[in-house]
Image: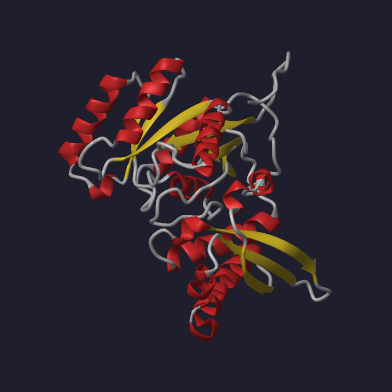
């Protein structure tokens, strides 16, 4: 939340918008669309976002800081519990709270129903964003909006396609109008507050998610060991991929290291595009038993190990 100021005579406005929803509702895609550039990783797999990611969008004289939170679901493991707790904490931090729902689903999923019940209990104001409207018949959109509104009294209901951009501009304009008067909280040229070391690790983790199948992506994590600025203006980045089982190393590396080379190249190219500079990326796959129960990992993601 922005700090109180007795005069509050600012010509600018700034505030936070928290995005919550079930896994794969499209929160990261919407934030990227609002910011105008990719700042949060996006994959078709659920539970991709592990920590709170902030994206910074400008609308005329208004700065909107989006907080993309992990998907809220029924947790089974320590990491799951920490992610869900981070999502609810992120919901408390916003001047505006948006609940995203994937309206392409034929029915309201259990995770969304649980979120609605918690919102109703908390008394927190929220607006509903029906996402992926291009994948659902119009009749379902109207019925779904009515059905969800019966379970919770939303401030507003929006219908968007974060993927195509349909409805995003109207939502952004409305959010800008809700922001309190304040000086800008970040440099207007910034797109995110994510450190470069984390950006590199998250970019590689996204490519691993996209190229590996089934449960394997959830059994790994990526950390930046070293970031060196070279004299020619390029960056040298060393990353470690930690897997929970020794047998996973071979799957990630592939025959003769071909799979890892392909994934590493994709990550390097995306980093170079984001940073507008040359990047030398070196990755190593390492076995670390029970990394999911290592408290040091949680602090890197700003998650509570004891959630």
Pick whichever, 24 or 181, lies toward us: 24
In which quarter of the view is residue 105 placed? Answer: top left
Relative horizontal placement of residue 265, taking residue 48 as reference (left or right):
right
Q: Position of residue 210 (x, y in %)?
A: 44, 64
Residue name at image x 44 percent, y 43 percent: 27
In which quarter of the view is residue 198 placed? Answer: bottom right
In which quarter of the view is residue 102 placed? Answer: top left
Above or below for 275 versus 198 = below
Q: Position of residue 180 (x, y in %)?
A: 60, 24
Residue 158 visible in the snapshot: no
Above or below for 229 versus 189 = below
Residue sitting farthest toward the right: 231
Quadrant position of the N terminus in the picture: top right
Residue name at image x 60 percent, y 71 percent: 268
Relative horizontal placement of residue 95, taking residue 186 as reference (left or right):
left
Q: Position of residue 228 (x, y in %)?
A: 79, 67
Relative horizontal placement of residue 52, taking residue 282 as reference (left or right):
left
Residue name at image x 74 percent, y 72 percent: 234
Residue sitting farthest toward the left: 139
Residue 182 visible in the snapshot: yes
Q: How is the image coloured?
A: secondary structure
Q: Position of residue 55 (x, y in %)?
A: 58, 45
Above or below for 135 versus 143 = below
Pick whichever, 30 or 107, lies toward us: 107
Residue name at image x 44 percent, y 68 percent: 211
Pick whichever, 106 or 216, lies toward us: 216
């Amino acid at each position: 939340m922005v700090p109180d100021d007795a005069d509050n005579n600012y010509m600018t406005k700034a505030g936070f918008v928290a995005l919550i929803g079930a896994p794969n509702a499209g929160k990261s895609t919407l934030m990227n669309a609002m910011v105008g550039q990719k700042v949060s990783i996006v994959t078709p797999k659920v539970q991709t976002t592990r920590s709170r990611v902030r994206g910074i969008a400008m609308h005329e004289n208004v700065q909107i800081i989006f907080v993309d939170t992990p998907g809220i679901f029924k947790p089974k493991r320590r990491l799951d519990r920490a992610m869900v707790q981070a999502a609810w904490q992120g919901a408390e931090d916003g001047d505006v709270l948006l609940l995203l729902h994937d309206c392409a689903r034929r029915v309201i999923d259990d995770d969304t129903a649980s979120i609605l019940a918690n919102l109703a209990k908390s008394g927190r104001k929220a607006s509903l964003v029906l996402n992926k409207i291009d994948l659902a018949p119009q009749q379902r959109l109207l019925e779904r909006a009515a059905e969800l509104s019966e379970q919770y009294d939303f401030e507003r209901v929006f219908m968007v396609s974060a993927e195509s951009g349909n409805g995003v501009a109207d939502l952004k304009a409305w959010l800008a109008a809700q922001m309190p008067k304040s000086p800008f909280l970040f440099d207007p040229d910034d797109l995110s507050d994510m450190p470069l070391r984390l950006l590199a690790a998250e970019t590689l983790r996204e490519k691993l998610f996209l190229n590996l199948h089934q449960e394997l992506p959830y059994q790994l994590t990526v950390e930046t060991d070293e970031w060196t600025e070279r004299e020619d203006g390029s960056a040298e980045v060393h990353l470690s991929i930690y897997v929970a089982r020794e047998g996973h190393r071979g799957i990630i590396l592939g025959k003769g290291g071909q799979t890892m080379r392909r994934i590493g190249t994709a990550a390097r190219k995306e980093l170079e595009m984001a940073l507008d500079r040359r990047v030398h990326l070196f990755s190593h796959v390492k076995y670390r038993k029970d990394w999911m129960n290592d408290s040091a990992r949680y602090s890197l993601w700003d998650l509570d190990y004891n959630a």
